[in-house]
Structures are given as C-alpha cells and as structure tokens.
Image (tube, rainbow, N blue to C red):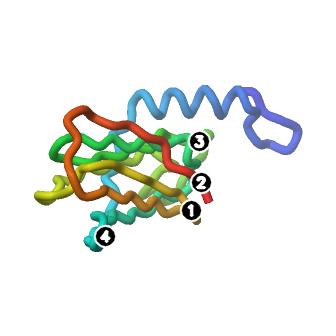
Amino acid sequence: MSETSNDRPDHATVVEATEAAAASMRLQRVPINAYTTSEALVIVSPLPAVRASDVEVELGPEVVRFVARLRSAGPREYLVNEWDYGGYEREFELPDGFGGGVEAVLANGQLTVRVLRGRVDEPVRIEPTER
C-alpha cells in the first residue's frame, strides 16, 4: 500500500479500496419515513456521506427505488464497523394513485423523494438535485 508522508493512504489506494469494496459489498437497506400530501407521496431517508451525483432514483409503474453508490472505502482498521459510506438502497411499493412523476433532493445527508399523483408507463430515472 502506498502511503503519503503523514501515514494516510494516497488517492490511488483509496480508489482501489473503494472499487474492491463496492464490488463485494451488499447494499445497505436504509430506513425511510413516508407520508402523503395532496400532491405527492413523500419519502425521506438518511443517506450520510454521499453526494447527489452518487444517487439514482427510479420510478416504475408500481415501485420507487433509490440507490446510492459507495463514496469512499479507504483502508481502515475499524474497532466497530456498522455502516459504510454509501452502498445504500431502498425500494418502496407505491400506493394506488401515485407514480405520475418523481422529484428528489439531497440535503444535509437526507434524501427526500416526491412521487407525484398519477401513473407512468415507462420507468423514469433521475439524479436528485443537491441543496
């Protein structure tokens, strides 16, 4: 392993470790809160340590799903390792009447997905905006 002068792994080492971890890891199922408004179904989920460009939201005829790629997995010797920086996933079955479109915002480590009333026939994929 290549190290920098202050005993921190160099960029190439972190990239290599992240690619290896992403290839072998199981996606983490993240918790959600979901509620309805007059216009949309709103789903809120914590996604710590990822950027909007790491996240993809997919709306299908019956489900909405989001996935966040692994951000960084630098080599570390953990004492406790209960979560990773990404590799998040969640799928939610849509109640009747929802699925006409999708909007998403990532802010302060929290993803908010709005699934509009109505119906789509073809899957829609979006990247959230970042605030």
Mark 3, residue position: 72
Mark 2, residue position: 130
Nearer the camera: disc 3 or disc 1: 1
Q: Nearer the viewer, residue 100 or 36?
A: 100
- Separation of disc 2 and disc 1 at Cα? 6 Å
Q: What amino acid is at disc 1? A: Ala
- Separation of disc 3 and disc 1 at Cα? 19 Å
- Separation of disc 4 and disc 3 at Cα? 26 Å
What residue is rendered at 31% in x and 70% in y? 33
* Residue 129 point in image, percent of width and height: 55, 51
Q: Secondary structure at mark 4?
A: strand
Among the two numbered marks 4 and 2 on one chain, the one whose residue lies closer to the N terminus: 4
Q: What amino acid is at disc 2? A: Glu
Quadrant of the image containing the C terminus: bottom right
| Cβ–Cβ under 8 Å for marks 2 and 1 | yes
Among the two numbered marks 4 and 3 on one chain, the one whose residue lies closer to the N terminus: 4
* Residue 105 point in image, percent of width and height: 50, 57
* Residue 89 point in image, percent of width and height: 34, 47
Q: Quadrant of residue 49?
A: bottom right
Q: Secondary structure at mark 1?
A: strand
Quadrant of the image containing the N terminus: top right
Among the two numbered marks 3 and 1 on one chain, the one whose residue lies closer to the N terminus: 3
- Separation of disc 2 and disc 3 at Cα? 19 Å
Mark 1, residue position: 107
Among the two numbered marks 1 and 4 on one chain, the one whose residue lies closer to the N terminus: 4
Mark 4, residue position: 33
| Above or below: residue 37 compared with residue 55 | below
Among the two numbered marks 2 and 1 on one chain, the one whose residue lies closer to the N terminus: 1
Q: What mark, if any, has residue 27 been given in the picture?
A: none
Q: What amino acid is at disc 3? A: Ser
